[in-house]
């Protein structure tokens, strides 16, 4: 490359020297001016933000609740994307009573910590969003609004639904539409006056039409079988259908373990879609193998002029470190790369177990790159 540049310079120099005269300005050829607009955006998506009772207890302080230390090790990393999305799998409320599994209600302080850690958007369509009824949804959205987080997937009233379904934002010059759906709500019917997006292909098709003017459509789906490390037939079929309806990226949650990534290309080898079937847990108190951490997806979009949008995908892993601080239980999210530097307690075997479970994502078996778009089966 460098040799090529030097050769070009030498040729230009020879041409200038051998010419031996100054070309009048009026007839000088003007170099081509690249006025094409270049748009670039980085999108980051993290998995399920869970709040089990021990986590709520650990966040308690003399003054209330504080989740900021939990996100401290990943704050800088998370904040360097143009847009960061997290799946909030608990309801929020400003005052007690709080509760963990099976009907989640966590302190609103969690929303402030997420915002502080760089999260911009909370996904709400999941099987726990109706855990605290209508007021649970209203309180959750109020907490997110107070913290300055955008939200989609569940809606506190009709104006909220109209405004945020799909949630459309301009990021790096791109119009990005975020759509969010859940397979169900643990048998609880949606309370009157509030709305929860369910996996309903008629509704999704209508939403995709509304999102048609966006440059990028990110469809976030709460689906799959818990603790299954492979996507189900239903997940694969829905993903295929979503691409036919115009999805650019599909992001999955709910299995609590990481599932494969698929990068779809067209016949020219250009990336046309990326599916993260399940990102696993971003933070939780779960300990079953593979559920004590998750995947963090990074997507980069670049477009020159009217050329097709270039998409590239990357993924990293995080692990939830449960430890004791001043005699108290504590949690913090650690990037996988940092584990060996900071873990020197009895949890090191868990960290290593999670690290080993991530190795499979380096194999073609779990990361399918280049499957041709439109021929998914
Ligand atoms: Zn779930």
Image: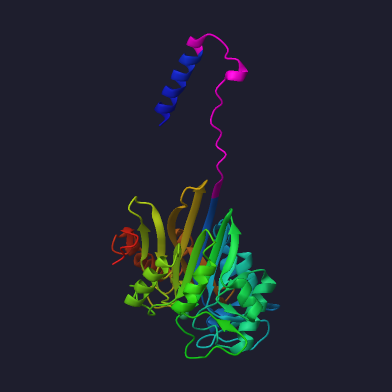
> Where residue 299 appears, x then y in whole percent?
47, 57
Q: Which residues are magenta?
A: 17-39
Q: Which of the 4 quarters of the picture holds residue 279?
A: bottom left
Query: Number of callouts in the render?
Result: 0
User: As rendered, which of 57 and 171 lies closer to the eye?
Assistant: 171
User: As rendered, which of 357 and 221 lies closer to the eye?
Assistant: 221
Q: Is residue 20 magenta?
A: yes
| Identity of the residue drawn at 32% across and 53% down | 267
Q: Is residue 57 magenta?
A: no
Q: Residue furthest top?
A: 20
The secondary structure that most of the magenta stretch takes on is: loop
Q: Is residue 269 found left or right of 302 in the rendered image?
A: left
> Where residue 167 appears, x then y in whole percent?
58, 69
User: As rendered, which of 174 and 353 lies closer to the eye?
Assistant: 174
| Identity of the residue drawn at 58% across and 19% down | 27
> Where residue 69 appears, x then y in whole percent?
60, 68
Against 358, is 311 above or below? above
> Where residue 229 appears, x then y in whole percent?
34, 73
| Identity of the residue drawn at 61% across and 85% down | 194
Q: Is residue 135 found left or right of 351 in the rendered image?
A: right
Residue 90 in view in this figure: yes
Q: How is the image coloured?
A: rainbow
Q: Which of the 4 quarters of the picture holds residue 81?
A: bottom right
Quadrant including the C terminus: bottom left
Quadrant including the N terminus: top left
Residue 283 in view in this figure: no
Against 121, is 193 above or below? below
């Amino acid at each position: 490359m460098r040799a090529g540049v030097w050769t070009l310079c030498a040729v230009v120099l020879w041409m200038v020297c051998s010419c031996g005269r100054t070309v009048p300005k009026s007839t000088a050829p003007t170099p081509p001016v690249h006025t094409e607009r270049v748009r670039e955006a980085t999108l980051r998506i993290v998995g399920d933000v869970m709040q089990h009772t021990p986590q709520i207890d650990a966040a308690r302080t003399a003054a209330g609740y504080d989740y900021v230390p939990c996100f401290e090790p990943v704050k800088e990393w998370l904040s360097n994307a143009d847009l960061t999305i997290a799946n909030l799998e608990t309801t929020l409320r400003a005052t007690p009573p709080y509760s963990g599994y099976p009907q989640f209600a966590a302190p609103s302080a969690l929303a402030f910590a997420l915002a502080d850690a760089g999260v911009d958007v909370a996904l709400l369509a999941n099987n726990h969003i109706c855990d605290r009824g209508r007021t649970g949804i209203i309180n959750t959205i109020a907490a997110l609004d107070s913290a300055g987080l955008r939200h989609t997937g569940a809606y506190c009233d009709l104006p909220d639904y109209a405004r945020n379904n799909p949630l459309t934002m301009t990021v790096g010059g791109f119009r990005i539409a975020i759509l969010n759906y859940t397979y169900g709500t643990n048998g609880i019917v949606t309370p009157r006056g509030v709305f929860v997006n369910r996996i309903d292909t008629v509704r999704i098709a209508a939403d995709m039409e509304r999102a048609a003017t966006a440059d990028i459509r990110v469809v976030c789906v709460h689906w799959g079988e818990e603790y299954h490390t492979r996507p189900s037939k239903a997940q694969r079929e829905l993903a295929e259908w979503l691409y036919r309806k115009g999805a650019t990226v599909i992001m999955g949650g709910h299995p609590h373990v990481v599932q494969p990534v698929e990068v779809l290309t067209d016949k020219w080898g250009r990336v046309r879609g990326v599916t993260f079937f399940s990102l696993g847990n971003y933070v939780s108190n779960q300990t079953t193998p593979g559920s004590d951490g998750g995947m963090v997806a990074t997507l980069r979009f670049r477009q020159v002029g009217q050329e097709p949008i270039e998409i590239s995908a990357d993924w990293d892993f995080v692990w939830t470190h449960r430890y004791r601080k001043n005699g108290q239980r504590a949690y913090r999210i650690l990037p996988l790369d940092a584990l060996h530097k900071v873990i020197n307690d009895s949890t090191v075997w868990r960290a290593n177990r999670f690290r080993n479970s991530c190795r499979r994502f380096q194999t073609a078996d779990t990361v399918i790159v280049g499957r041709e778009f439109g021929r998914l089966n």
